Every structure is written in structure tokens, then in C-alpha cells.
Amino acid sequence: MRYAMLICVEEKRLQAMTADESAAVTAKYTTFMEEMGQRGVIQGGERLRDVSDATTVRVRDGEVLTSDGPFAETKEQIGGYFIVDCKDLDEAVEIASKIPGAAHGTIEVRPIWEM
Amino acid sequence: MTADVAAAFRDEWSRVVATLIRATGDWELAEECAQDAFALAVERWARDGVPGRPGAWLTTVARNRATDRLRRSAVGGSKVEEAARMWEPGEERSDPDYSGIDDDRLRLMFTCCHPALSIEAQVALTLRTLAGLTTHEIARAFLVPEATMAQRLVRAKRKIRNAGIPYRVPPAHVLVDRTEGVLAVVYLLFNEGYSATAGDDLVRVGLTAEAIRLGRLLAQLMPDEPEALGVLALMILHESRRPARVDGEGDLVLLEQQDRSLWDPGLVEEGTRVLDAAVRLRKPGPYQIQAAIAACHATAADPALTDWVEIAALYAELSRMVPSPVVELNRAVAVAMAEGLEVGLRQVDALGESGRLSGYHLLHATRADLLRRLDRPAEAAFEYRAALDLAGTEVERRYLARRLDECRGAS
């Protein structure tokens, strides 16, 4: 089964970090990636820039409407994601719980709609 | 339904459904084929008599039906192959996560109670697939429209499939947590039925029997799990008092006033026996402690003989395991009975001042009760009034109103 793991964290929290703290977070992600790399379960994943850099696009009546900012204003924002291929939801939950962001933010585990 | 089929239905439904789900991975198909098999049984058994092993008969019929249906719907050869292979024993044993417990009904139970499902869905699925209740019955038991319940079941099954919820007993490292979830669903079912009273819908009241049936199954499948035995003992001991809980007018009768000759001695004996078996495993847990408290009450021939010192100690232990202001309130009552009403009242007051139980009618009802026993009727009346303003069920309100009248008469 493949799952998207959406990492929802408070951007403000990350922005307020000192350089050392940021480096520590990066190190945790590196460790996580190494462990999961050995297990061969990660198919992809990226960190996303802040929602202040996001652009929202809609097409209404043939017109392209763009606006600044995210799709929805929420307390937590999607800061990154992984695409994971593993046995079942139990394994997916176990992997999600090891994503460093889970310790302060929320990981949304979404099964991929295989076409 | 004839009595024979009804009995087989009770005993075999979950086994047949559980086997079919494991083999086909398709919950809808499993239920439909099980239903077909039972329908055929009604017809055949009336004519030919009940077979020697009704369970095996039902499973074979349901299995053949499933194989046929899968063959017919098979797009390519792979599905047919799958259908042929699916009755071989699972490959689970070679799985490093294999729990060591090999029973389809237990797999079914853990899957129904998977924490990725809402608690409402867990309860509904358990009743449908393990207890064999119809959607109509489950809807009535939970006081929701049948269409709502049907949708809840469909959604839950869809999530199991789409989200990849595994059909298995969880591996050892999460087994304790997951078992807790299963036991919580069973006990919730029991309480739904227990809080219903004689005047209520019989389907609702019948939930206690379903919960006990599931509890027995769990205890049988996990004989080394003390809390499974604990919750079973607790349910049986509560159930033993059911006939005495409500009087002829449908009014609530408190433990102290209950006619103990109405308690079911067979259930009391069974409950204490199950509890003893749990305790011998030497791994105490909240259900065992609660069952031990229930046993203290159940084995006291007279309210005056209740071992309140032991009960207070058990509540202290429970409070340590699962800290909760409600447990502390119960402990205060036991302390009042064991060490003196004033001591208990001070503990209740301290709890009240902490604000952790504000808005909880039993805080006021408990305080009222202690004040009444202390012969302070005016203060008691004030507290009964406060409890009445907050009280939940109609039966509770009638009880409190009666007490309020008594205290007003006395003050």
C-alpha cells in the first residue's frame, strides 16, 4: 500500500528557531531518512517553502484567478510530505510516528488512490 | 427462524464471517455469503435435521458460495486462482509480526476495533460482524435512524479496505494497547445496555448479553490476558445485580437498598471465579480492580457487612492506575463508609473545590447523600436540588426528587 504522509506543523514555530535548533531538526530528518532508506519504504518526499510563498490558482468561467497565500488559513500548515510504500496501515502509522514533525505537529496519513 | 438455526446463528455467525473475511478480504461478500448460508440452513435443517457439526456445514456452504461468486466476477485467471487458493491456511505464521494467536474471530475483533476507525464505527462493526445483529437492530440500540447506521457501517468497511487496515491480531509490541481498545469497546457496549432500564427497548437492554458473550469469547481466545478476564468478571458481577436494580415502578434502587435475594447467585459465583483466574495471572489492571470492587459488594450478604476498608483501598489503587476525579469521588464514598462520614465529606468537599467535577450531578448527589446520613437535611436538600438540576436520565431524576422530598420533610 502506498500512502502520502502530510507533515502539518506550525510554521511560526520553525521560523522562531535559532540556527542551532534548525540544524538539529535537519539532523533528525536525516536520521529518519537513513533509517527509512534502509527499510526501502520511502518513494519520495520534499520539504515545502512557507505558505507566505504559496500561490493559489483557480479557474472560474475560463478565467485564471491567482491569489497570494495558502488554500486555507489554519494553525498548522503542510510543511512537507513523504510518499511511503509499506505493508498496511499499522506499518504506515509506525513510520508516521517516527517523522520528527510528529513530535510537535500532526502527520496526516492518506492512502494513495491508485489509478 | 427455528430454535436450532437461531442457536447455530448465535454460536457460528462470527466464526463464518471471520473466516470468509480472511479468505476473501471482502467484508460485504463475507456477510452476504454468511447470510445465504444461514438462509439455506433454515430450509434444509427443517427438512433433514441439524447436521452433526452445524458450524462446519455453514462454513462450507458460505465458502462455496463465495468461491462461486468470485469465479463469476473474475475478470482474468488470477481471481479464480485466488479463489482456489484462498482457503489454504494463512501465511501469517512466517510473518515476523505474527502474534501467535490464530483465530479468525480474534482477527475480526481487532480489525473492528482498530484505532483508525471512529469509536462509533468500531462499536457498530463489532455488533454487526461479531455479534450478528442486523443494521436495523444496531440502529435501534443506538437510537439513530437505520439509514445513518447503514452508512456508518458502509463507510467503516470502505475505510478498512481503502486505508489498508490489516486483518490480523496485532504484533506483540502493540498488543497491550490494542487489546485495551478492544476491551473498551466491549465494556462500552455493556454500559449502553446496562444504563438502559426495563422500560427501554429490549434491543438496548440486550446489549449487556451481547457484551458478555463477546467478553467470554475474548477471555477464551486470550486466556493469558488478565484484563480480558477482568472485564468479563466485571460485566458478569454487574449483571448479577440487574434484577434488583429497578423496582416495580421502574425506579432506580441503589445498591444499599437492593433486595439481595434477587441477585443471581450463579452469576456472582461465575464472576468471582473469573476474577480469581485473572488475579492468579499476577498482572493487575483497572478492570480487575473494578471487578474486585464489584465482588466486594456482590459477596456481602448484607450492606452492613460490606468490606469498605478493602473497597477504599481498591479505589486508591484504581486512582493510582487511572487518575480520574470520578474515581476519587467513589473513593471518597468508600472512605466515608470505612473511616467515618465526616472524613469522606471532607474529601468530597476538596474535590468540589478543585473544580474538576463542576457540572457533574453525582458530585452533588454524593455530597447530598453524606449530608443526609450526617442528619443535616437542610444542606442535603440544597445539594439534591443542585444534582437534580444537572441530572442525566429520567430514572436518576426521579430518585433525586424522592430524596429531595424526604429531606425537605425532615428539615
Image (tube, coloured by chain):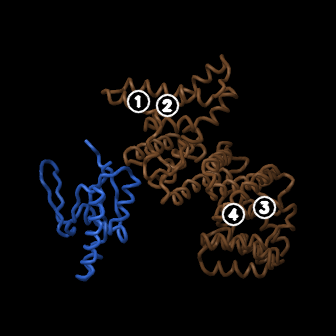
The amino acid pointed to by label 4 is: Gln
Q: Residue at x 38, y 48 (%)?
A: B163
User: Are the numbered discs 4 and 3 placed on the same chain, yes or no?
Assistant: yes
In the rendered structure, the residue with mark 4 lies on which chain? B
Tell us which disc is closer to us: 2 or 3.
2
Q: Secondary structure at mark 2?
A: helix
Quarter of the image where one finds residue B351: bottom right
* Residue A24 x/y as whole percent: 27, 77
Between the residue at mark 2 and the residue at mark 4, the CA separation in whole angstroms equals 40 Å
Residue A73 appears in view: no
Between the residue at mark 1 and the residue at mark 2, the CA separation in whole angstroms equals 16 Å
Query: Which numbered disc, 3 or 1, marks the residue that appears first in the sequence?
Result: 1
Mark 4 closeness class: few <14, some 14–19, many ≥20 residues within 10 Å: many
Which residue has dot 1 on it?
B83
Residue B147 appears in view: yes
Q: Secondary structure at mark 1?
A: helix
Apparent colour of chain A: blue
| Chain the render paints brown | B
The amino acid pointed to by label 1 is: Ala
The amino acid pointed to by label 2 is: Glu
Q: Is residue B407 left or right of residue A55?
A: right
Q: Give residue B254's mark.
A: 3
Which residue has dot 2 on it?
B32
Mark 1 closeness class: few <14, some 14–19, many ≥20 residues within 10 Å: many
Q: Secondary structure at mark 3?
A: loop
